[in-house]
């Protein structure tokens, strides 16, 4: 017996290694998506729970909602995408103003 670690992945064929890598990546992606969903739910709960006290607070909520809306737009919907970009630029410009 030896204390050497044997890397079993290197002893498999290329197809088997690729399949294993794909399964591992898929598991990572699914775990990350679940974490993202939980964080988004927590953010939504926080945004619903508090009223905006300032224009900056309202802008945070508006950015979030516009991001959700923009994610639903099709690739060819350049008009609405441009409108979302313009509103986001306006919010950014207004926040910088004194």
Image (spheres, rainbow, N blue to C red):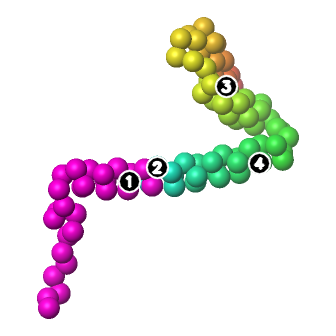
| Precedes in sequence: disc 1 or disc 4 | 1
In the rendered image, which quarter contains the C terminus? top right
95 up-or-down from 75: above or below: below
Between the C-alphas of marks 1 and 4, the distance is: 35 Å
Between the C-alphas of marks 3 and 1, the distance is: 32 Å
Nearer the observer: mark 4 or 2; the answer is: 2
In the rendered image, which quarter contains the N terminus? bottom left
Marks 1 and 4 close (CB-CB < 8 Å):
no
* Local crowd size for mark 3, using a 10 Å CA cut-off: few (<14), some (14–19), many (≥20): few
Nearer the observer: mark 2 or 1; the answer is: 1
Residue matched to label 4 = 46
Q: Which sits in the foreground, 70 or 12?
A: 12
Nearer the observer: mark 2 or 3; the answer is: 2
In magenta stretch: residue 25: yes
* Local crowd size for mark 2, using a 10 Å CA cut-off: few (<14), some (14–19), many (≥20): few
SS for dot 2: helix
Residue matched to label 2 = 29
Secondary structure, magenta segment, majority class: helix
Marks 2 and 3 close (CB-CB < 8 Å):
no
* Local crowd size for mark 4, using a 10 Å CA cut-off: few (<14), some (14–19), many (≥20): few
| Precedes in sequence: disc 2 or disc 1 | 1
Between the C-alphas of marks 4 and 2, the distance is: 26 Å
Residue matched to label 3 = 69
SS for dot 3: helix
Q: Which residues are magenta?
A: 1-27
Counting from the top left corner in percent of width and height, residue 21 is at 31, 53
SS for dot 4: helix
Residue matched to label 1 = 23
Nearer the observer: mark 3 or 1; the answer is: 1
User: Measuring 17% from the left and 87% from the top, which residue is drawn there?
Assistant: 3
Q: Is residue 59 visible?
A: no
Counting from the top left corner in percent of width and height, residue 94 is at 68, 22
């Amino acid at each position: 017996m030896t204390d050497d670690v044997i890397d079993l992945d290197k002893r498999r064929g290329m197809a088997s290694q690729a399949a294993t890598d794909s399964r591992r990546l898929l598991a990572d992606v699914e775990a990350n998506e679940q974490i993202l969903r939980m964080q988004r739910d927590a953010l939504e709960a926080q945004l619903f729970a508090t009223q905006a006290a300032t224009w900056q607070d309202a802008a945070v909520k508006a950015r979030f909602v516009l991001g959700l809306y923009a994610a639903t737009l099709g690739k060819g919907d350049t008009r609405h995408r441009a409108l979302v970009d313009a509103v986001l630029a306006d919010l950014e410009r207004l926040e910088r103003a004194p």
